[in-house]
Each structure stands twice: as structure tokens, then as C-alpha cells.
DNA sequence: CATAGATGAATTGTATGCAAGACTAGAAAT
DNA sequence: ATTTCTAGTCTTGCATACAATTCATCTATG
């Protein structure tokens, strides 16, 4: 499984990096050739990614990079908002010097990136900042859930941080979140994180909504939003 | 994959039913024989269950039913509490007559089961009640997450509902939750659901803590709680 | 007697082959 | 011209075979 594990990571990375666009077929044979292995470990990697929700494996019909409908995407961001506020609430309750320092460092890094208007760097530092909050919840299971969902949404988040003023606004929101957590104000930390995340989601799913009005099979959205 | 999907379900059911106890090895060959298939679809099913966190697949070392440490178990219940309160909060905000009726019906069923002291029946009806709340959040993605975690915890929840007075207490808590959701009181619904779930978690992880003091390799807990 | 090493058995990981269902294109019919 | 049926091709699903690693047992040595 060493092989399959590496492949799973590689395919996931390729999806996150946007090399495979949403809707693209992930053909077993071509992936096998590309990585120089047989179809077996490829299948195993794909099935695992499917179970994690990264891709969509449809029995007998192959795997594709999942195409969340605007509705689904909004639901994902709303869920992310709820999970992140939970992390923030717990972090405010349980903050340790270690976790505080980690958040501070990540925040500083974001500050630098934002000042330089380097959105690619900000994207990376922003991720670290949020992950520092997840860890600060001192609930590793919750943190894992948060990591996973954050990863699934990262492709969408990145595009949307390109606007320069959004960088500065994001940074300011980070400052407010950090302040609330340090003050031990669970409620405030939760609402600030919630709004911070959801505003991204709203903006982005609006954008997708606009894009997908053009032409896209509604079959996806049915599948995605069905119980 | 039709085969593999059925197998995944069957193995999951067997684990939930307690046929495979936490810590049991899930040997590919014996499972293959048991279900009358080759190892290939068994492996695919196991890897998917592993990706969903149901079981623990360790490269080159086989799959076992995961054995959450007491700490990990508490974290899982705490996360469940956070997710359920999120559902409750959204349900309070967005309640429709349909969802209201579904919750009401499930609650009535719980009432009957509790009166009869039928804990096995209550277990099933309780599940329906909680699932009705998930759906009432009108966020199908969040609801899916809630379903999944609820399933993972069901093995632990069941044991603990055996106490008869706990049934009645649980029922009363349900009534309070329902009331808060109907009143549209997001905050109250959230806290009541949070407490309802977490009290189960605390009780149960206390119990597990007591049990595992006897003798159990601490290696599991390290693996489970590590980042 | 305990411990370390080695050898053999058992189990997992990967490749390959074959069977079965899905997709494509073309022909026939309305 | 559009639609439906059909034949062929392509892709996935499963089984089997082999390779590689881990685990267990036995032996040898301190």
C-alpha cells in the first residue's frame, strides 16, 4: 500500500493544484501509465479519495473530479464556518501559550504577505493561521475534520483571494479573531470566525452561480444535494 | 464496484453491530472467503472504510477495527456535540412544516419506546430523531457529516442507553430541544443539543476510561490522538 | 533462563488477464 | 431530420498469480 498511499497523495495534490479541473475524468489506464504502475493501486487511491469526498466515483462509470453545485458549495462553506467557529470557541476556552504563539506567528506571516500584496504567499500563510486555530481547539479529532474540509475547499478559496483589498480585509478579520480568542470570549471568537469564513463562501458561491448560469448539466447538483 | 460497494456496507454493518469488536483484525483472506469473493473487492471496501475513519488500515500490517482511546472518544463526542448544535441552530432558523412534522413524529416514537422501557427500540427511534434534526438544518452537506459521525459513534451510544432512567432523561431533553427549535431560539437550541450529546459522551468515555485501565496497549491512543 | 538471530509461514501489495457493463457511431425507420 | 436500435469498442470490476514484507517460531548463544 505504500505505492497506493503515494499515489493517493499525488492525485489529491494534482486535483488541488487544479491540474485536473472539476468535471475531468480520472481515467484509470492513463493515470496508471502516467505514474508507471498498474491499475490496481490507482483504483485503490481513487476509491479512497472518493470516500473522502475529494472526487466522485460512480460505479461502472469512472471517477471524475467532483463538481459541487453552487448550492452544495455554499453548504460546504457554511459547514466550514460552523466547524471553524467551534474550533474558535474551544480555543478561546483552552488557549495555551504554545498555541497562542503559533497563531501569533502565523498572523505575522499573513501581515507581511498582505503588505507585499503577495496573494500566493498569503494563501499559504492564511492556511497556516487557520490550522493554528484548529490546533488551538485542543481537540485533535475536530481539528482533523477542519483540516480535511479546508483542503477540500482550498481550490475555491485560492481564486477568490486574488483581489488585493480582500487580502487586507481578511487580515483585519484575523486580528479581530485573534483578539477575541485571547480575551477568552468564546461567543465573539465563534461569530467572528463564522463571519470570516462565510463571507468567503458567499462571495465565492455567488461567483460560481454566475459562472454556471452559462451552461452546466443540472444532474450534478441533483446528485450532490440529494440526501 | 457493485460488489465492493455491497461489501463495504456489509462490513460496516458488521462492525456497527459489534460482530467485529474494536481491535479485531479484519483479515482479507477470511473476509473474502466469508463473502465468497476474491481479495480485490475486499481490499477496496476496507480501504474505503479506512478513508472514512471507520477502521484503521495500517500499511503492510492489515486492517483492524479502530480502538479510540478514551481521550479520542471524548473528542469525537465533543465534535458531535458541536456539529449537532450547528444543525440545531440552523434548524431553528429555517424550520419548515415538513421538517417540523418529521421531528415531531420521531419524538413521538421515542416517547412510546421510552414508556415501554424498550431500549433497543429507543436506540433506533433516537437515531431517527437526531437525523430529523440534521435534515431540518436544510444543509445537506452538514447533515451528511452529522450522519457519518453519528454512525461512527453508534456502537458506543447503544451500550450506554441501556440504563432505563437515562431513556426518560434523554426523552425530556429531546422535548426541550424540540421546543427551542420551534421557538426559533437558535442559541437555546444549540446549547441544549450540545449538552444532550456531550453528556452522553462524557458518561461513555468515563466508562471506557474505567474499562481500559485494566489492560490495553497505549500505542493505540498515541496513534489516535496524534496530530 | 533469557535474549538475539535466523529461517519459514502467513499476509499484504502489485500486476495481469478476463468478463461484463457502458459509451459511440452508424444504420434503419418513422 | 430526428430518433431508436444495434454492433463494436472502450472502460471498469473482479479473480488469480506472484512479489515483498511482516510475523512467529525455533535455535543458538551469552
Image (cartoon, coloured by chain):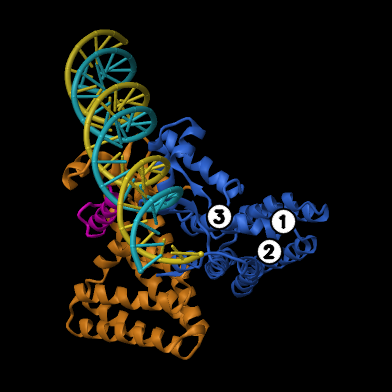
Chain colours: A blue, B orange, C cyan, D yellow
For the residue carrying disc 3, how many other residues have a C-alpha within 10 Å: few (<14), some (14-19), or many (20+)? some
Residue B7 located within the stretch drawn in magenta: yes
Residue segment shown in magenta:
B1-24
Residue B63 located within the stretch drawn in magenta: no
Q: CA distance from mark 2 to mark 3?
A: 34 Å
Total number of numbered labels? 3
Whether residue B224 is visible to the viewer of this picture, yes or no, is no
Whether residue B67 is visible to the viewer of this picture, yes or no, is yes
Q: Identify the subunit bearing mark 1.
A: A
Q: Nearer the viewer, residue B167 or A66?
A: A66
Identify residue for label 2: A178
Q: Identify the subunit bearing mark 2.
A: A
- Which is nearer the N-term, disc 2 or disc 1? 1
* Labels 2 and 1 touching (C-beta < 8 A): yes
Indicate the secondary structure of the residue bearing disc 2. Answer: helix
Identify residue for label 1: A107
- Which is nearer the N-term, disc 2 or disc 3? 3
* Labels 2 and 3 touching (C-beta < 8 A): no
Q: Residue furthest bottom?
A: B183
| Magenta region, main secondary structure | helix
Amino acid at each position: 500500500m505504500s505505492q497506493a498511499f503515494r499515489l493517493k497523495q499525488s492525485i489529491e495534490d494534482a486535483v488541488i493544484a487544479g491540474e485536473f479541473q472539476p468535471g475531468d475524468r480520472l481515467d484509470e489506464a492513463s493515470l496508471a501509465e502516467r505514474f508507471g504502475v498498474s491499475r490496481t493501486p490507482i483504483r485503490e487511491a481513487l476509491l479512497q479519495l472518493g470516500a473522502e469526498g475529494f472526487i466522485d466515483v460512480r460505479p461502472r462509470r469512472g471517477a471524475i473530479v467532483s463538481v459541487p453545485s453552487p448550492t452544495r458549495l455554499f453548504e460546504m462553506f457554511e459547514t466550514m464556518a460552523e466547524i471553524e467557529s467551534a474550533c474558535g470557541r474551544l480555543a478561546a476556552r483552552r488557549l495555551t501559550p504554545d498555541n497562542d504563539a503559533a497563531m501569533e506567528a502565523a498572523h505575522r506571516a499573513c501581515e507581511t504577505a498582505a503588505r507585499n500584496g503577495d496573494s500566493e504567499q498569503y494563501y499559504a500563510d492564511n492556511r497556516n493561521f487557520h490550522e493554528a486555530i484548529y490546533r488551538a481547539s485542543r481537540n485533535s479529532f475536530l481539528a482533523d475534520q477542519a483540516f480535511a474540509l479546508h483542503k477540500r475547499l482550498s481550490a475555491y478559496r485560492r481564486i477568490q483571494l486574488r483581489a488585493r483589498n480582500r487580502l487586507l480585509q481578511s487580515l483585519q478579520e484575523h486580528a479581530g479573531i485573534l483578539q477575541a480568542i485571547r480575551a477568552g470570549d468564546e461567543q465573539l471568537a465563534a461569530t467572528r470566525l463564522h463571519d470570516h469564513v462565510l463571507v468567503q463562501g458567499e462571495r465565492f458561491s455567488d461567483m460560481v452561480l454566475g459562472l454556471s448560469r452559462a451552461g452546466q448539466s443540472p444532474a450534478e447538483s441533483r446528485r450532490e444535494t440529494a440526501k
